Amino acid sequence: MLPILGDASLVDILEKVAYNALPAPMTRDLWGHQYDQQPNQVLVSEHPRSWYNNGPAANLFGLEPNFGCCTANLHQGWPKLVQSLWLATAANGLAAAVYAPCTVTAHVGEGAEVTIVEETNYPFGEVIVFTLHGQRPVAFPLQLRVPAWCEAATVQVDGEPPRLVPAGGFFTLERVWTDGDRVTLTLPMRVRVSTWYHNTAGVERGPLVFALRVQEDWRRLRGTDPYPDWEVHPASPWNYGLILNPRAPERSFSIETRPWAGQPFDSARPPIVLKAKARRLPGWVLENGSAGDPPVSPVVSSEPVEAVELIPYGAAKLRVAQIPWCEG
């Protein structure tokens, strides 16, 4: 749809799906997946659930839980995302649509070949560096997408002063490019809180959705290596209410970045963690093997204040992503 409509908001949606919903149902080694994933997924087990159209195994991690179609199709997600990172433009230029570490080679301007190396830790990091390589100088427009969630994006070309660029569209750099030119795009990511069912809080930073971290106890159910079926049971409490200041909810979180450990969507070693405070909600319990409806927020709890962590949704195989909250 983006090449047809040119609407940058479509890519904001694409990134939210690709960097959250796509990795969430996959095991760290990518041998297993789920047929059904849940935003508030606090127990993965073979159990009759409240949904009516899939079987008790639909929530398991395995080679082909419930139905085998995902086994043949789910692996297409990442390669097709890579195919969509860059687009050619009608003005014989290039548009950086989706951000990820990559290299692109294309013909631009009057047919000159250029290679652009994109270096970044996005979606976990804020800085994206593009380095251009070519045999000769060439004039062409380079378009960079600025997400709607980014309020103070800047673009810097080589040693020039950075420029503020507007959110929610494509910013065009039109110039003669030479070998070694470098463009730095900085997309500041503040923590945002959105409202969901029963006034629960959704916590986001940049394109990433964050979820309450629940410790995982992986239990092999059946099957053959390297693709058995797995249940995942909670090894820590999950029924918390975040302590939020409703007038400035982003102040309720601190950000901790950590070294990359290869696979970024790994619940044991996520590259970024949000720290927060919360109280237990003892009345919020399982129903038919899943987290029951969250209580309507704000919630009153007399339980002691505890420190909790939120990690990227795509890394959290057990999680609470629509989170009740208490005023604080």
Image: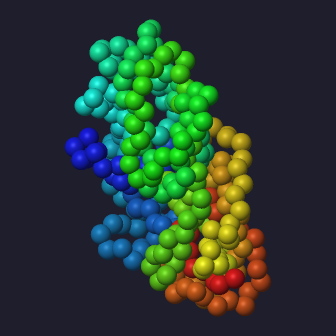
- 220 or 8: nearer the eye? 8
The residue that appears at 40% across and 61% down in the rendered structure is 36
| Looking at the image, residue 138 lies above or below residue 242 | above
Query: Foreground residue, 281 or 175?
Result: 175
Depth check, front residue: 279 or 205 = 205
Question: Which residue is located at x 72 percent, y 47 percent?
Answer: 258
Left or right relative to 119: residue 88: left
Residue 152 in picture, x, y percent from top left: 55, 52
Find residue 251 and report its image quarter.
bottom right
Quadrant in the picture for the C terminus:
bottom right
Q: Position of residue 289 (x, y in %)?
A: 50, 75
Name the residue furthest left: 4
State the image coordinates of residue 259 (x, y, percent, origin top left).
Answer: 71, 42
Q: Is residue 267 visible?
A: yes
Give above or below for 94 relative to 41.
above
Can residue 24 be spotted in the picture? Answer: no
Display colour scheme: rainbow
**Front residue of this view, candidates 198 and 283:** 198
Q: Residue 128, position in %: x, y?
A: 55, 37
